[in-house]
Amino acid sequence: MLLNPISVHSPKTIQEAARLYKSLPDVKLMAGGTFLLNSLKLLKRKGNKTANNVVSLRHIQGLYGISIQDGVLTIGAMTTISALYECSLLKDNLSILNVVCKNISTNPIRNMATVGGNLTCRYTWTEMGAVMIALDARMHFVSDQGVDHVMTAEEFFKAGARTDKIFSHVTIIHNPLLRVSYQRVKKTMHVDVPLLAVCICGQTKDKVFSNVWVSINNGVGFAQRDYLLEAFLKGKAATLETIEASMNHLNPEIYDKRSDDYK
């Protein structure tokens, strides 16, 4: 399907991109394009208005790459899902990123889709959000004035994943003491997006849970923490009985809003 006419802008710097994004009318950002192009096609098919301007981030070199320095992992917004999946730096608590990347779509899509696109596309069912919250990741943005802004992943998704700035990179502290688990239930055999995803990050000391973070993606709202479950697990013995009892200490406001398909 042919798209409606659009003007594509290709800035060379992140500040230039931020200026265009703030000043142009009816504008969308394009990272890998896997979400945006499908969205534009769907809008046209339904006869709805589509964007007049697209700002491509493809030529901004500073948005690519993965590095670790002083115990902090940095992932550029334009880093592809495939590049992150294949990265040798993902050790200990960071290795959960390898798991979630493997769950995202197919190889051709992972070769195009970007970390930034997955986090900022505003689709509630994307998988990176819950993991970034559980890892207490910091998301970095640049304004049209070139000013850096930092917020936690939890803050970003609490605000509805909206921003008038350009997402530049995400940082995560490498902590070899933390253990992370990510589990998901996909929608159907043929539609591999999560109806419910749970990411638990924490550690045990003397077989007792401590410093536990639980983030949930219910497929309806943006990923969020389950503070009730976190409070229950804190200080509890890491036993099968505790795990079974935890099912009675979930935040119902999160799980009762799951989609009708899952119910």
Image (cartoon, rainbow, N blue to C red):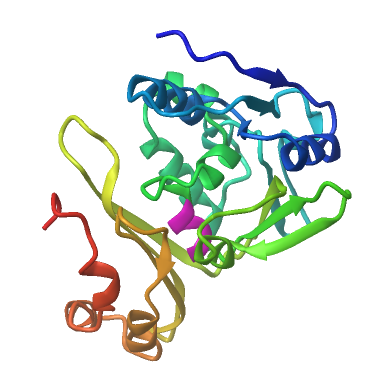
> Can residue 26 be seen by looking at this rendering?
yes
User: Which residue: 81% across, 40% down?
Assistant: 19
Q: Position of residue 131 (x, y in %)?
A: 47, 56
Residue closest to the far top: 2
Task: Tell whether 227 sits left or right of 177.
Answer: left
Q: Position of residue 86 (x, y in %)?
A: 55, 32
Q: Is residue 111 above or below residue 70?
A: above
Instruction: Name the dominant secondary structure of the magenta segment.
Output: helix
Residue closest to the far left: 263
Q: Quadrant of the C terminus?
A: bottom left
Q: Is residue 256 above or below residue 127?
A: below
The one nearer the camera, 72 or 49, is 49
The one nearer the camera, 115 or 11, is 11
Q: Is residue 237 above or below residue 148?
A: below
> Can residue 74 be seen by looking at this rendering?
no
Q: Position of residue 70 (x, y in %)?
A: 79, 59
The one nearer the camera, 13 or 202, is 13
Tell me which segment is drawn in magenta.
Answer: 129-134
Q: Is residue 26 above or below residue 209?
A: above
